[in-house]
Amino acid sequence: MMDEDRVRCALISVTDKTGIVEFARALQTEFGVRIVSTGGTARVLEEAGIAVLPIDELTGFPEMMDGRVKTLHPRVHGGLLARRDNPAHLAQAIEQGIDLIDMVVVNLYAFEATVAREGVSYEEAIENIDIGGPSMLRSAAKNHASVAVLTSPAHYDVILEELRANDGATTRATRQRLAREVYELTSAYDNAIYQWLTLEINREQGSEAPPVSALGQGPVPDDLRLFLTKAADLRYGENPHQTAAFYRPASEIGASGCPFHPVEPSFQLARARQLQGKALSYNNYLDLDAAWTAVREFSEPTCVIVKHLTPCGLASNPDIVTAYQHAHDADPVSAFGGVMAFNVPVPAALVEAVYAKGQFIEAIIAPAYDPMAVQLLTEKPNARVLETGGINPPGGVDYRSIEGGLLAMASDTVEENSADFVVPTRREPTEAERASLLFAWRACKSVKSNAIVIASATLGAGAGFDGGFALLGAGAGQPNRMNSAELAVRQAGEKAQGAVAASDAFMPFADSLEVLAAAGVTAIIQPGGSVRDAEVIAAADALGVALLFTGHRHFRH
């Protein structure tokens, strides 16, 4: 190890003071390192009996402007940036009285923690934007040929071991790795400030003004910034030969997807707490996302069972156990091994109902679980059980990759007033049909296009309306809408008699309507807007089917 790689002088200025006293003491007592420090860090070290050179004595200039200016000085940055292999740099350092600094130990003002606090003011947030810290980190990282730069207490023990193994010197490989971490940190830090400031600008503009670059509300952004951190390595992707990982936003500020459509991140799938079960797979995440998205369409207690990204069971009922039973009965074969989502806390009786039906549990997601429900679920230790803590509102941004690029769009959260829906047929839907149609319309939104859904009100033990609704059959992902209708009819079977249907987009021909009507469907909800609407309406009138046009489509590709 070359002598110039030895650490003789370290500058220490940390917000997180975990382990800093022990680290500084080891530097000084074991390796004779001279320590320069600032403000609160200097006081902590001095109180621990560690000799410290205050930063203002190094610079010959007082800390000023409430600490805004203390390390932005040539005697700091010259000491960090001088190239040890450049005689001219070293001569200029001697001429200007600049001491070389071989190690920087800096972590930044806790900006994200500050802005996350309830009621934090704009001014307080601004004062917690670190200037000197990132500047020192970047200078040290640029000169990592000679300077070691530490940004986290997690580095301390590792670096001490390296110093002990190398007579007080660090290795180039270590300095290079630490430098890379600096730029990862500072880029994420700047992004957090960018995200926060964007939100603040949006708030100051008022709720009537769109975000600075809002998808779905005004111009889309020219520059899309996504900073993600790996949360987990996955066993594999869709297939065993594909590698995969799960990522979350590096910044909690960016967790909403801002600067686009801010959404409360607390209850998102990505932040759900896994109570038990095997590690989530790539396909688990996709199915859970589809289920969690679908169940949040409903305010009533609802169960959604998803298989391969499409609901195979979906029901709402004042009693969540009954909702589950109706959802399961829609397609028991597909429900086996499916992913389930609930929009209310899961009681023990629900887990007992799942066991009574002999359903294999792949994964469950819900806002919460009764303690006895959690205890019962331990009987299936491999079942993945996720708790979100609540229901986050719909919204945000949907991202999808294509080869060599990324698509982004505002989530499908259009506000619809059913009072504005139009009845183009001679026959109006009955009150009962209308209620079932509105359920079918929300259910259809979560089914892959071309989507056809058959649904109806559900009956209780006394064969009377029990206050709920259920999916009876679904045709999904078909290039031909008539094929989707035939699949939905086949799944619904005799239950299609007197039921209603929904189509996620307009019916371009009367053929799919005729398939549904032949199975006994009495009313259909669809967007309308086809050039052949008149043909479809005429067919509905001839068959006695009531139509309800919404004016919006809900493709889910």
Image (cartoon, rainbow, N blue to C red):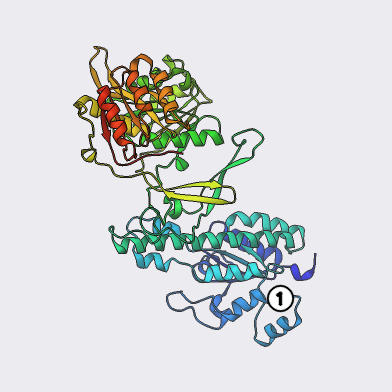
Position of residue 323 relative to residue 534, above or below, is: above
- Residue 527 horizontal side relative to residue 340, left or right: left
Q: Position of residue 257 (x, y in %)?
A: 43, 52
- Residue 168 horizontal side relative to residue 291, left or right: right
Q: Position of residue 286 (x, y in %)?
A: 50, 36
Identify which residue, 98 or 547, lies in the foreground. 547
Q: Is residue 365 visible?
A: yes
Q: Secondary structure at mark 1?
A: loop
Quarter of the image for the N terminus: give it: bottom right
Position of residue 23 relative to residue 365, above or below, is: below
Circle 1 sits on which residue? 83
The answer to which image quadrant residue 439 occupies is top left
Position of residue 112 relative to residue 315, above or below, is: below
Judge the density around disc 1: few (<14), some (14-19), many (≥20) Cα neighbours within 10 Å: some
At x 62% / y 36%, what residue is drawn? Answer: 236
At x 53% / y 25%, what residue is drawn? Answer: 382
At x 54% / y 56%, what residue is drawn? Answer: 18
Q: Position of residue 250 (x, y in %)?
A: 51, 53
Q: Position of residue 444 (x, y in %)?
A: 37, 32
The answer to which image quadrant residue 386 occupies is top left
